[in-house]
Amino acid sequence: MAGKRRLFWQIYPSYLLITLISLVAVTGYASRSTRQLYLEQAALDLEARARICQEQILRYLDPLDARQIDQISKRIGRNASTRITVIHPSGKVVGDSNEDPATMDNHADRSEFIDALNGNRGTSIRHSRTLKKDLMYVAVPVKRGERVDAVIRASVPIGAVDETISAIRTRIMFGGLVIAVFAAILGLFVSRRITRPIQQIRSWAESIARGEFQYKPSITASEEIQALSISLDQMAEELRERIETVVRQHNEIESVLSSMAEGVMALDMEERLINMNEAASRMLGAHLSHIQGRSIQEVVRSTHLHQFVANTLASRKPTEKDIPMSVDGEVIVNCRGTLLRDAGGKQIGVLIVLNDVTRLRRLENIRREFAANVSHELKTPITAIKGFVETLRDGAVKNPSDADRFLAIIDKHVGRLEAIVEDLLSLSRIEQSAEKGEIERIDSRISDILQTAVQVCHIRADAKQIRIEVSCPVEMRASVDPPLLEQAVVNLLDNAINYSEEGKRVQVEASQGDHEVLISVHDQGCGIEKRHLRRLFERFYRVDKARSRQLGGTGLGLAIAKHIVQAHAGRLTVESTPGKGSIFSIHLPINRGDNASA
Ligand code: ADP
């Protein structure tokens, strides 16, 4: 609004100026008209006085008796307080009420005299050098028939007229001034009446612009302003509805985006973020409050993602890529980029949809590795069996001692194959039962399960003079599947015996905490280096492959134990010190309704 004057200051001064001009014009015209009227009146008066003289001087004109005429002039002039001058048609003054005619100029050139000589009334206003005043002269002809014998001129000073006129003008001006003051006050009121509703409408429009729709002034004004206020009201209503629609749509989009498991982010052509949902910020480790308008490079520290965004923008077609999101490459995010277009079809940025596929990729890897491992594990004994069968066929069968030896080796490999297949079958049975929730959990005494497991293993333990000690409260119970839990403990005991030196001790302990039942198997064996612990429970993972095979291990024992414990909603953990021994622990949560007691 800089440089623009307020409407009030545009209306009010113009109004004042018009009032003042009118006042000056009226005053000027009135005083002029009044002066005219006065002078006309004075001229008529002087004419009447001149005509009074007419009769009296007529008889002294032929023959001319200048002395008489002069006396008559002086008398009438004195009585009428008017200067009377009688002028001969030649211009010579023959009588004058105030002066001696002999001393006076010839008046032949006076305009009023010339008019009178022509038979009309002559009027003139001019400065008299004789009297040093402004005078009004009125001259009338004195006729005998058609002949003008003399001109009688009456004159008065018009100073009095001017004074009267000036007094009248002063009064008019004073009156005008009073009217002007009233007009100014009235103008102020009228201007305010015009500008106030406009001011109200302006404040109203400003409040609409701020989104305050509840404010609505009552405006009483002219038809035009009323129409404007109705239009503004309609506009505000439409605007409110549109804003409500936009806000509702925005909220809908926001809630859809925030409830999505997929991460979504929109970027403009300069790679600045327009929007990002919670899932995306979680996956990318960005803070939602600081993203709007900032570049992707500032918000996310992943050169792979920066490159992907740049490629999508440059290629102008949908793109897809798996991107590692953590330094160790553990977290994999699948990114799909599509172009964002405005209503006119112009590209305004890109939309990136992010999917955390870490689990999926890991499962794919596990499946791939598993297939490779199974093939590998089966191939070794099969190759050996095939080789010895061929050797036997080639003639070794005829040598009884060789034949026995080779058949024993074939038997060992068949046993190995059987063990692997059995372990694989039981693993898949446990997985399937756990998935279907078919594990049969019954309230069981834990010490019974542990004792059975120890009995299963005691021949192998005795063979290595390994003592197995069990420490378990007799009355301790938990809701478990007894054969499965027994198998898990047997697997742990088997390992403890296999990886311990002869004559060592293995302890099986069971205890109950507030939230879980803990069964742990301690051994004094070779222990496991820390770097192996993370992958120890994977299928076919072995620390020392040759030793495991030699001991008849399948590499599936711990995987089976883990799945059994998981089927009971528990955890299998390991602590180990190389050279000193290991502790494998089964943690079984105590569910409500379990009747476990020490
Ligand atoms: P395996 O049939 O080879 O024993 P497991 O799945 O039972 O297969 O064990 C995997 C690997 O973990 C073993 O090959 C062995 O290297 C290691 N391991 C398991 N238990 C122990 C233990 N008590 N002490 C030392 N190493 C162990």
Image: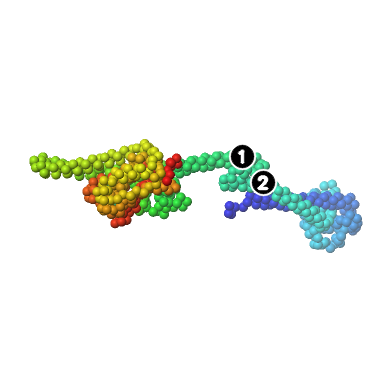
Quadrant of the rendered structure where residue 240 is? top right
State which quadrant residue 317 falls in. top left
Q: Where residue 509 sits in the image (x, y, percent)?
A: 36, 49
Which residue is found at the position 41% from the left and 51% from the top? 285
Image spot of residue 493 (x, y percent): 30, 47
Q: Earlier in the sequence, mark 1 or mark 2?
A: 2
- Kind of residue indicated by mark 1: Ile
Residue 194 got which mark?
Answer: 2
Q: What amino acid is found at the position of numbered circle 2 in the picture?
A: Ile
Q: Residue furthest bottom?
A: 103
Marks 1 and 2 sit apart, C-alpha to C-alpha, by: 17 Å
Q: Looking at the image, which residue is at 81% across and 57% down?
A: 163
Q: Determine whether, in the image, residue 36 is placed left or right of residue 301.
A: right
Could you tell me residue 444's position as x and y percent? 38, 40
Identify which residue, 541 or 255, lies in the foreground: 541
Compared across the picture, whether 433 is left or right of 290 comes to left
Q: Height in image: 477 above or below 155? A: above
**Which residue lies at the image location 24% right of the left edge and 42% below the top edge?**
419
Residue underneath mark 1: 230
In this orientation, does residue 78 appear?
A: yes
SS at circle 2: helix
